[in-house]
Amino acid sequence: MLVESKLRDGVIYGDVENAEYVYMPGCEIGLVAPMCVYENDGKRDDVDIHEALRLIRVRSLQPTYHPILGASSC
């Protein structure tokens, strides 16, 4: 629940070494069924919140600093 709460607050999760990031765009914050963004290998894919949480857990992603967005997606 803590990870979901932080994700909904705009915290960016990722792995800088592998250039892999999961975050919720600012325009999705506050929505009932928000979409998130998964970046990997220079590609961006839309994923639902459940898939975003699964990716964060499975890939052991931590709060991080995105090279373009900074520390927050909003």
Image (cartoon, rainbow, N blue to C red):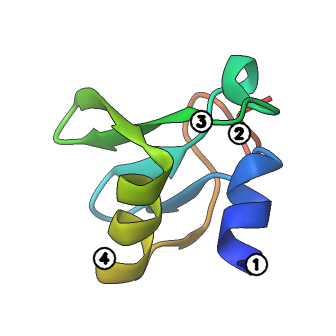
Frontmost of labels 1 and 2 is 1
Q: Is residue 3 left or right of residue 39?
A: right
Q: Residues within 10 Å of mark 4 (few under 14, many from 20)?
A: few
Vertical arrangement, residue 44 with respect to residue 61, above or below: above
Which residue is label 2 attached to? 70
Frontmost of labels 3 and 2 is 3
Along the viewing direction, whichever of 61 and 5 lies nearer the viewer: 5
Q: CA distance from mark 1 to mark 3?
A: 17 Å
Q: Residue at x 59, y 35 (%)?
A: 33
Q: CA distance from mark 1 to mark 2?
A: 21 Å
* Of pointers 3 and 2, the one earlier in the residue sequence: 3
Q: Is residue 65 left or right of residue 31?
A: left
Frontmost of labels 4 and 2 is 4
Vertical arrangement, residue 3 with respect to residue 73, above or below: below
Q: Residue at x 70, y 39 (%)?
A: 70
- Which percent across, then down, holds residue 68? 58, 28
- Which percent across, then down, holds residue 23? 56, 44
Element marked by disc 3 = loop
Q: Residue at x 67, y 73 (%)?
A: 3
Along the viewing direction, whichever of 36 and 14 lies nearer the viewer: 36
* Of pointers 4 and 1, the one earlier in the residue sequence: 1
